[in-house]
Image (cartoon, helix red, strand yellow):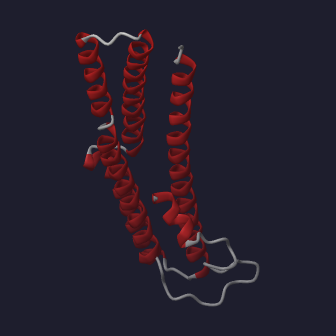
Amino acid sequence: MDLMPDTDRLRSHIRDDVGGMVDELRRFVDRRIAELSMEISATVQLVDFSETNLSGQLARIQEQMASVLAVPNLQARNSGLELEAVVQVTETAANQIMEAAEAIDGWLRSGSRDVDGLQAVSERINSIFEACSFQDLTSQRIRRAIAHLQQVDDMLAGIASGAKIAQSAPAPGIMPVGGSGADLAQDDIDSLFN
């Protein structure tokens, strides 16, 4: 029985599943950065900052943005690399499981019931169990990537909350901050992390 097409299909499905999650996380971060950028821009337009105050605010925002960008270096991990490692570990485990299953299937189809064959089947079954331990490693890496992305989101939220200043009525033609724009529902955000 040739299982190579099944192996290739399994690899493709694994890449599709994990790739989709990575793309969804990237879109979420990009969307969040765009929202914060619009809020900061609107705040600057709506409030009459003095030059000194504006310079101080911009310097603070630059410092906070620099700290957001420095997070991967400080923690010596990158969410993209973590998720790529998940793909690789998952693919290796899937290959090991498929190879063991093929060997067991071959032995069963041969009709041989010798002691050496039983020992080989037992070893293959153990290799399947060992390969299934990939879940522990991948879940750790995914949790680290999620924690890192949550930290970046928290830092971005801190930038936005630190920039809130009493607002006067908006100038004609300028949409107020938090106006009728489409906000993310909490369920949408939670679904990214489930």
Q: Nearer the viewer, residue 44 or 102?
A: 102
Q: Give the left or right position of residue 102, taking residue 119 as reference.
A: right
Say which quarter of the image contains residue 110: top left
Taking 124 as reference, is 35 above or below it? below
Q: Nearer the viewer, residue 142 or 116?
A: 116
Q: Nearer the viewer, residue 1 or 53?
A: 1
Q: Give the left or right position of residue 184, taking residue 158 as reference.
A: right
Q: Give the left or right position of residue 37, taking residue 100 as reference.
A: right
Taking 92 as reference, is 114 above or below it? above
Point out the residue furthest to the right here.
173
Give the residue displayed 56% in from the left and 82% down from the top. 47
Give the residue displayed 57% in from the left and 19% down from the top. 5
Q: Give the left or right position of residue 89, taking residue 2 as reference.
A: left
Q: In the rendering, at what x and y percent does residue 187 appear? A: 54, 69
Taking 1 as reference, is 130 above or below it? below
Say which quarter of the image contains residue 106: top left
Q: In the rendering, at what x and y percent does residue 131 appear? A: 32, 31
Give the residue displayed 37% in from the left and 48% down from the top. 142
How many marks on residues?
0
Using the rendered image of the protein, determine whether residue 55 is visible from the camera's viewpoint.
no
Say which quarter of the image contains residue 161: bottom left
Q: Nearer the viewer, residue 102 or 89?
A: 102
Using the rendered image of the protein, determine whether residue 10 is visible from the camera's viewpoint.
yes
Q: In the rendering, at what x and y percent does residue 69 appear? A: 38, 52
Q: In the rendering, at what x and y percent does residue 107 appear? A: 38, 13
